[in-house]
Image (tube, grey):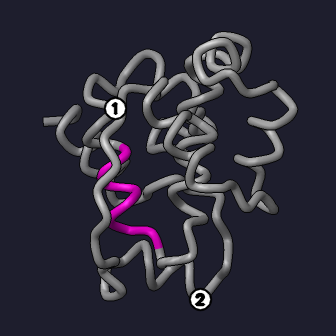
């Protein structure tokens, strides 16, 4: 929950608040543990915010393929990730993960992937409250 006691809605955030999806995605890539789970989750949330029907048209993939690839159990091929990121107008850069970041430590200890990028979202929340 947020400071206001509301449940955080990632879709609302991505649609109404995030004005730099490239930076959001980059933050998630930087904080991924190296298994792709955070990147997959970020792509999935961004895909839902865009609309899966529209994304399916732009990628040439079926909605079922998109949902399966971006699910927590998904293991998408690079081609699929490339098509999705291109449709979302994202740049893919390969970087070494920061295993000392707070989100990496929290995810490693709990194996809970409910937060897309806690430190990135907190940075936006802090900036918005200034």
Q: Which residue is drawn at 43% across and 58% down?
A: 118
Residue 6, located in which quarter of the rendered image? top right
Left/right of residue 97 with respect to residue 34 in the rendered view: left
- Residue beneath disc 2: 109
Image quadrant containing the C terminus? top left
Q: For this rendering, which residue is in front, 40 or 102?
A: 40
Label 2 vs label 1: CA separation?
28 Å
Please rate how many residues cluster around mark 2, counting C-alpha atoms within 10 Å: few if below 14, some from 14 to 19, many from 20. Answer: few
Left/right of residue 33 with respect to residue 27 in the rendered view: right
N-term mark: 2 or 1 = 1
Residue 62, located in which quarter of the rendered image? top right
Q: What element carries label 1?
A: helix
Q: Which residue is drawn at 73% across and 13% down?
A: 53
User: In the image, residue 86 lies at what x, y percent?
Assistant: 43, 30
Tell us which disc is closer to us: 2 or 1: 1
User: In the image, residue 126 lies at what x, y percent?
Assistant: 23, 45
- Residue beneath disc 1: 21
Left/right of residue 84 with respect to residue 73 in the rendered view: left
Q: Residue furthest right?
A: 64
Left/right of residue 63 with respect to residue 1 in the rendered view: right
User: In the image, residue 17 lies at what x, y percent?
Assistant: 36, 22
Magenta span: predominant SS is helix
Q: What stretch is highlighted in magenta?
A: 25-32
Position above or below: 127 against 60: below
């Amino acid at each position: 929950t947020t400071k206001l006691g509301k449940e955080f809605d990632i879709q609302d955030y991505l649609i109404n608040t995030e004005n730099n999806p490239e930076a959001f995605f980059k933050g998630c890539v930087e904080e991924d543990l190296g298994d792709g789970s955070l990147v997959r989750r970020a792509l999935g949330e961004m895909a839902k915010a865009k609309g899966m029907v529209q994304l399916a048209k732009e990628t040439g993939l079926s909605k079922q393929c998109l949902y399966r690839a971006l699910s927590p159990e998904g293991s998408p091929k690079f081609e699929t990730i490339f098509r999705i990121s291109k449709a979302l107008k994202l740049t893919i850069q390969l970087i070494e993960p920061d295993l000392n970041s707070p989100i990496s430590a929290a995810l490693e200890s709990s194996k809970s992937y409910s937060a897309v990028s806690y430190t990135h979202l907190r940075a936006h929340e802090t900036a918005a409250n200034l």
